[in-house]
Amino acid sequence: MNEDFLYFDHTATKQIPKEILEFYIEQLKINNYNPAARYREGIRAAESIRIAQEKIAGLLHCRPSELILTSGATESINTAIKGLVFAPNPKQKRILTSAGEHAATAETLKYLRESFDYQIDICELNPDGSLNLEQYEQFLSRNQYDLISLIAVNNVLGTILPIETAVSIRNRLQAETPIHLDAVQALGKMPFDFRIARVELASFSLHKIGTPKGIGLLYKSEDTRIVPLLHGGGQQNNLRSGTENPALVCTAAFAVTRTLEQLTKNCAFVQELKAYLFRCLDQAAVNYQRISPAEPDKAVPHIIAIAFPELRAETLLNVLSKKGIGVSIGSACSSKKSERNSVLRQLHLPGNLDQYVLRISLAETNTKEEIDQLVKKIAFALAKYAVK
Ligand code: PLP
């Protein structure tokens, strides 16, 4: 990573920690055979994948056979949703989701609606960005669904879904309907355990916890039926064909282990950094408005949506970028789409305040000195360009 660059966009991708990078490079040197090959090196590569999957499953408290290796969460989510819908499961042609979903889910569901006539029911968010559980319950008591797909931690706001509550409402009203969880921003930012999150499908992207990009996981409980999206050599129990990268899979196991070992310590540190950020903004008399919920049990501390009502987020982002600081804006759905962000729209912010929302995302690698720099540069930008 560029040493002069102050990085506050870890939600988009985490920079690869030195020990993970070194581990991966070493693995690439010694563990780069085709795991389907029948000679000793290939058999060893396959064995290393088996051990890595076993390790990750142990840490997440599921069975190794319930984890499918993918290229990332977008693939996991597409496989979970389309795989379930295209499998010979009962068909209500109706899916329940929330207005807080990442494009990987929202666009997949839109495709099913437009191309396969699926009815997609969308639960609203509360003004703090959490799922409207009353409406969720109403939907489930009125209609029968093929699938429920929910985001565990919102990537714009950091809001946490009360997974156990969502699952118990489902259990009470239609126990047979599977739940898919987009758990991308949960892993490494809060405790996550399949013994507690009793869902049938869950998606993860491991670059969000510091592996190189190109690896994700799909959890599929043993009795959930899906069909593969990718057909070919029959890897991953015929559910995801394509040659696995044994070095990357072993690195993923290393990263998940490291992340979960350090979880409590790192979350406490990030919580402290977040509190420090707000103290510094107050001391600098910066005009801001909290958008992410302030209560620690409602949002992970790593994702902070914050509005600076005197300066459009896009302008602020550009000024900060010129000063060597990386943040992101909350108002775009993705870097290439300029329409208003559907998650922020749900919050009914006054006027066009959603255009002023910046996403600052923290990691344990950030320091208080970096926060000092960030606040200084924000104060500078506001002093210079603010429209009062
Ligand atoms: N879901 C959430 C909540 C995300 O934050 C992201 C990425 O930002 C994704 C899904 C998609 O992950 P990827 O782009 O790694 O496939």
Image (cartoon, rainbow, N blue to C red):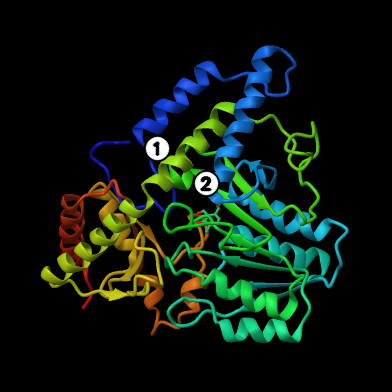
Residue 66 picture location, percent across and down: 68, 47
- In this view, the residue in front, 290 or 17, is 17
Circles 2, 1 touching at the beta carbon (< 8 Å): no
Specify the quadrant of the image occupied by residue 199.
bottom right
Seen as rendered, the residue at the extreme left is 283
- In this rendering, would 164 be left or right of 281? right
Question: Badge 2 is on which residue?
Answer: 59
What secondary structure is found at the residue carrying circle 1? loop
Q: Give the SS element for disc 2.
A: helix
Q: Viewer-proximal residue, 330 or 242?
A: 242
According to the picture, the residue beneath numbered tag 1 turns out to be 16
Measure how far apart labels 2 and 1 are at the Cα level: 21 Å
- Amino acid of disc 2: Leu
Task: Bin the neighbour count of mark 2 within 10 Å (Cα to Cα): few under 14, some 14-19, many 20 and up.
Answer: some
Query: Residue 144 location in percent, x, y?
Result: 79, 78
Q: Amino acid at mark 1?
A: Ile
Taking 358 as reference, is 242 above or below it? above
State how many labels appear.
2
Find residue 11 and report its horizontal and vertical position in percent.
Answer: 42, 54
Q: Is residue 121 visible?
A: no
In the picture, measured across the screen, residue 294 lies left or right of residue 273, that is: right
